Image (cartoon, rainbow, N blue to C red):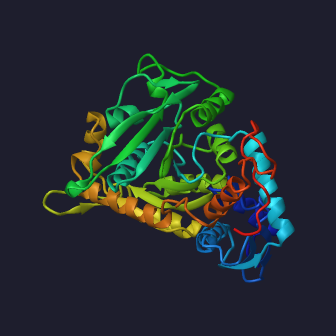
Amino acid sequence: MNQPQRPTSQDVERILEGVVDPELHGNIVELGMFRGAEIAGDGHVTVHIALTISSCPLRVEIRDEVASKVAGLPGVTGVSVEYSEMTGPERTELMQKVRWKARESAPETEVPLNTRIVAVASGKGGVGKSSVTVNLALALARQGHTVGILDADIWGFSVPRMLGVSGRLGGEAGKIHPNVVDVPAGGGEPGGTLKVISMGFLVEQEETALMWRGLMLTKAVEQFLTDVRWGDMDYLLVDMPPGTGDVQMALGRLLPRTEVLVVTTPNEAAQKVAARVADMARRSYLKIIGVVENMSAFVCDHGETYRLFGEGGGAQLAEALGTPVLGEVPLDPSVSQGADAGTPVVLSNPDGPAGVAFAAVAARVAEALPPIEMAGCTARMLDSVNAALDGDGDGDGDGSAGGSDRGTAVPEPTTR
């Protein structure tokens, strides 16, 4: 009998590189907060995390992020997180790292560290991945969130037409500005904002064929992440090209904290192909947050239900991956009609079967990945440091008299 697959300590360390401290601008591995993991024979993983102080208010958020990431590894049956407290010298070393990174290292991308990133992926084309991306983004924006859409399907871009958004991209100071759409909310509540980037805004005509090889595709995605001034966002949804190619590998390298949502249809063939995307995500140490089964059933006006593409593929895939089914979106003509007209079903028919289903998926995504709050113990620590600097009489932090043109220096703190 084959032994069950279990992760290694190296697997745990790699996937925890996706858990970031948005205030310290680094992941918990490079910051020295990860202190190892123990993997029991039954697949239970105990992760050891060192906090700057044991009473850090961010401990719950860190615990949830760590547990969520590690639970996504194959063979994990449970996760425990145990805390310890850094020593004074360790806290000093941590802040030296943070100070050095802020001074010497430019950020890899323009995507804020407190933005939740969701890659919407599928094993093959034709399963409605772009429709899911667009309607999910709009449903999140209708909740009042600021949501970005990165159309990473460079060859097969379709997001601009689905949203009814056109026009060339503007910019200034060497940065591109995304096209911005105000999204109304239901029931008279304040809506949200959509920020959109697509190759469709850069070509002369929608019918233009992009005959690019892998390196150019990778470079295009990299520029969308590094040269676009995204600004504050709660979520960034990435409409991935189908399959397991260069763009997928580039995203895993540039944004290791990405979470993957897999789209499939009910038939077994689509499910098997989608499993390859999930396998690639895990090989890239990206967590899979769930499965959306699209075109699950067609309901006639008289109430009869027809399973035109089979049944159960989404549930079978989710069970095989150990992830939840986030929703089943029915086969609804208003989805394609809304996409062709530039008014997605979440806006044109929010109370219809598909509109309700997309809203439910958005609610589950927001529950699984709530927006990251920036206010925490690190922010209060840095405020205390800045106050101490201002208190030496000249604001330069060195205790000497007179001004300085060197900017503010950050001394080693003793608490967080």
How many marks do you count on the picture?
Answer: 0
Which quarter of the figure is the C terminus placed in?
bottom right
Q: In front: 133, or 388?
A: 388
Tell me if residue 195 can be seen. Answer: yes
In which quarter of the view is residue 321 placed?
Answer: bottom right
Left or right of 32, for residue 128: left
Q: In front: 360, or 399?
A: 399
Left or right of 31, for residue 323: left
Q: What is the residue that sits farthest to the right in this orientation?
A: 89
Left or right of 60, for residue 182: left
Residue 24 % position (x, y) = 68, 56
Q: In front: 132, or 51?
A: 51
Residue 349 % position (x, y) = 21, 50
In which quarter of the view is residue 215 placed?
Answer: top right
Q: Is residue 146 above or below residue 91?
A: above
Q: In front: 413, or 246?
A: 413
Q: What is the residue that sits farthest to the top in this orientation?
A: 204
Seen at 65% across and 73% down, the residue is 56
Residue 165 % position (x, y) = 35, 31
Seen at 49% across and 46% down, the residue is 232
Q: Is residue 122 above or below residue 32?
A: above
Seen at 49% across and 68% down, the residue is 324
Which quarter of the figure is the N terminus placed in?
bottom right
Q: Is residue 211 above or below residue 117?
A: above
Tell me if residue 352 can be seen. Answer: no
In which quarter of the view is residue 222 placed?
Answer: top right
Q: What is the residue that sits farthest to the left in this orientation?
A: 302
Q: Is residue 115 above or below residue 404?
A: below
Residue 82 % position (x, y) = 72, 80
